[in-house]
Amino acid sequence: MSVPSSYDARHLLRLALAIVGAVTAIRVAVLLLTPLQLYPDEAQYWWWAQAPDWGYFSKPPLIAWLIWLTTRLSDAEWAIRLPSPLLHAATAPAVFAIGRLAYDARAGFWSALAYITLPGISYSSGLISTDVPLLFCWAVALYAFLRAREESGWRWPIVCGIALGAGLLAKYAMLYFALGALIAAAFDARARKLVLSLRGGAILVPSLLILSPNLIWNAAHGWPTLAHTEANANWSHAKYNIANTFTFIAGQFGVFGPLMMLGWLAAIWQLWRKRPAGANLVLAAFSLPILLLVTIQSFISEANANWAAPAYIAAIPLAVAILLHCWNSRLLWLSLALASLSMIGLWTGQLAPAVADRAGLGNALKRQEGWRELGATVSAESRNAPYDAIAAANRSVLAELLYYARPRSIPVKAWDQSAIPRDHFQMTMPLRVSTQRVLLVAPPDEAAAILGSFDSHRLVRRLSIPLGRHHERVLALYDAHFYRGPQFVH
């Protein structure tokens, strides 16, 4: 592949930025217009942003800081989600830079377009999640690592370390970056010279300094975030289920796109056969090990499709470089066309959930519907009697009540069946034994054990909230008196 002139590179970058900007403008418009409500995790992150801190029970703090920043504009759902399309737009030029550095500006251009239209990125752009800042930090860190591998000096190792530290404040999955660097060093002489030098220390030191306040927070609170991360892996209850592995692998073809995945696999196979040295070997070190590890995790216990997301920052240029040479680039065009159709379909579903429901995709949206109705009902009922608190046991219900059950004059509290907190709500806002009158929100089939911790109770009302044509959310409101504490639950 010929190396284009600097003029061509600038032209391709400007063109990529124009396309990324147009896609991002539409994504922001969709956020403003969608009737879909907050996903439970989004509502939880919003609640964290009401009290910015150095850490939270299940995640590091960066996502809460981002939401705190954008909700200075508004407290609406679109403002909570605004960091997602903006950060993905900022990640695309970093992917361009990685592709250009590893191959040329043409590969960088198509890598940026592949990233911004990737099915997983299109879906992620409509939500706020910890993967969004993680991917941005990963892309910056990887570009800086590649530059530091090729150039002497201290600037790029320090940039890499800052991005690595910021990524760790987004999600601990950023630790995979250290694994990628070590594997790259094992197979690539330039990477080895960087990692095993004082310049490698220049990567490590700023990342640890940036992470240290979060580590101090965790130590002061009994290491809840690390414990939660370990619990997610769930190796103590290993399942060794090959069906989970096939499901995870199928999910990767959906997240990355089938042709992009085939292109990446072909690139890995080509590297295995020819064993060349160069930036493409480094890209393989930052993608293959992550996918292998998470695939193993899916067999041992389970793994969500997004757990391997950082791998795709390096995987995209590898796949693009292969697809550019397949059938006169037609496979790459086909991959982008399929991804663009998927993106348009997602926009349609976000703007008109009824259309998605009629297409049989309502199940994917049901966790973003019906919460406003629940919140309004609970808020109104909380003013009908002298309740001391609103309480729920389910984390999703708690998160949604905090956002949607407004206005309210009484606090929302977390009911727990044990004295050991299992989420941020149970850690920071547990229902206390001294609480005399509680408006309890619970699924009817789960209410018996919860109500057993009160001296008396009565059913206030039963809610059945339609979620599209085929689903409903059923919850009951109880007037419960004199909470005795979790130790009395049978």
Image (cartoon, grey):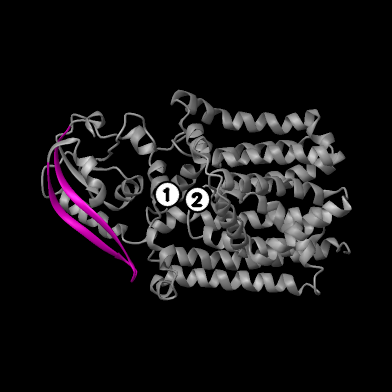
Mark 2 packing: few (<14 Cα in 10 Å), some, or many (20+)? many
Q: Residue at x 57, y 43 (%)?
A: 300
**Magenta highlight on residue 464:** yes
Residue 479 drawn in magenta: yes
Amino acid marked by disc 1: Asp
**Residue 171 placement (x, y as % from top left):** 55, 41
Q: Main secondary structure of the magenta part?
A: strand
In this rendered view, identify the residue nearer to me: 46 or 461.
461
Q: Which residue is mark 2?
A: 129
Quadrant housing the N terminus: bottom right
Q: Which mark is residue 257?
A: none
- Residue under label 1, please give it: 41
Query: Taking 484 as reference, is 241 above or below it?
Result: below
- Judge the density around disc 1: few (<14), some (14-19), many (≥20) Cα neighbours within 10 Å: some
Which amino acid, mark 2? Ser
Looking at the image, residue 158 lies above or below residue 296: above
Q: Position of residue 389 (x, y in %)?
A: 20, 40
Q: Are the two marked residues, 1 and 2, in contact with CB atoms closer than 8 angstroms?
A: yes
The answer, for residue 406, to whether it is visible in the render is no
Please give the range of residues in magenta: 457-483
Q: How far across and down, in percent of the image, does residue 267 sit?
A: 78, 58
- Residue 453, by quadrant, is top left
Residue that extends furthest to the top in the rendered view of this protein = 220
